Amino acid sequence: MIAPTVVFRDLLEEILELVSIGKVFTDIHIEENAPMMVKTPRKWQAIGSEPVQREEMIPLLSAIDLEWEERIAEGAIDRSFLLTQCRLRCNVYHCGSREKITISLRRLPLHPISIEKTGLPLYVRSMLEATRGIILVTGSTGSGKTTTIAAMLDYFNSSRSSHIITIEEPIEYQLQRKQSIISHKEVPTDTASFSSGLREAMRQNPDIIMVGEIRDFETADTLLHAGESGHLVLATMHTNSALTAISKLLSFFRPDQRDQLAATLASALVGVICQSLVPTENGEALALASEMIFNNNQQVAGLIADATKFHMLADFMKRKEDNMSRSLNDALAQLVIKKTVSPKDAMRAAYNRAELHDMISGVRN
């Protein structure tokens, strides 16, 4: 008797089909012995009901990393993976007491998008005219920080002659040289860590440095030195507000150092952008809400430098005295007024829900 032929799923083909049909999703979750899931603007959604088998995962795992079996024995694998229509940030890891393999995929555009398409206000370009200092892009995981940073770097690459060095884990956008020289450095392949990569970059004639994430004292310390010494430095952090990004950066230092370094940061900081992605009202896309601090006058710099006055920055942002700095609730309220997002989804994205509730009460039923 002839055994029936076993037909395995082609996961790569399924992913390509999901992209090609225009389905809106940000992440794919492939777990052994469970249905494949995608993260849509409002929820995780199963793709079919059939569980994925390990044999079906092997071609995708090999495409991500030919040595995946050896590497996953040492820990999670973090790689970028290029498809014909998009780029994927891949993380492969064991779970269930090492009985299962899981593949987590974050979808990114194939090429950097323009500043106009990020959803940031056009006046953010004034921040990008800086030739030195520090620009922080912050937000929770999945808030579009990578997309915004890539758009900024592409703007620099298209508009000025400079040497751009990026320090990433992994490299997510391979920028092609336009007007600028591009040097992509990957942690730990090209440099041991973010802090060592940043220290090395300082001796490699950069004009612009991008640091994938500030995680420790060494990176924070070198970042301040780079921004103060005439380089333009872009960096990301995980915080839920622009103010806490500044506080978190300073928290890497000893308490007795912070007053002096706050003054340094007040001098070097160009601005902070804190992002949140909110489902649109129809649930078919994501809208960007951004909180911003522009350090473009002595008043803002003075509030950053003086720990006793730092809390007053929140009131400054609400008053919009410079017509540029703004709170996250301002951005969320505008999205609700324009009927881009629902009040419910806006409230979920806010870190000061009571204030936002007052701002949008009566605007819509």
Image (tube, helix red, strand yellow):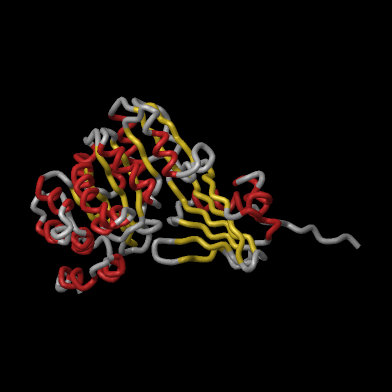
Classify 364 as above or below 106.
Answer: below
Q: Position of residue 214 (x, y in %)?
A: 37, 49
In the image, 53 versus 341, the foreground residue is: 53
Q: Residue at x 68, y 49 (%)?
A: 70
| Image quadrant in which you'd find residue 207 | top left
- Number of labelled discs? 0
Q: Position of residue 243 (x, y in %)?
A: 23, 57
| Image quadrant in which you'd find residue 126 | top left
Q: Position of residue 185 (x, y in %)?
A: 46, 37
Q: Confirm whether residue 288 shows in the render.
A: no
Q: Residue at x 39, y 65 (%)?
A: 42
In the image, 137 versus 107, the foreground residue is: 137
Residue, far front? 256
Q: Is residue 252 left or right of residue 69?
A: left
Q: Is residue 175 left or right of residue 136?
A: right
Q: Residue at x 31, y 69 (%)?
A: 348
Q: Residue at x 59, y 60 (%)?
A: 102
Q: Position of residue 322 (x, y in %)?
A: 10, 49
Quarter of the image with the N terminus in it: bottom right
| Image quadrant in which you'd find residue 252 | bottom left
Quarter of the image with the C terminus in it: bottom left
Q: Confirm whether residue 212 shows in the render.
A: yes
Q: Is residue 326 left or right of residue 246?
A: left
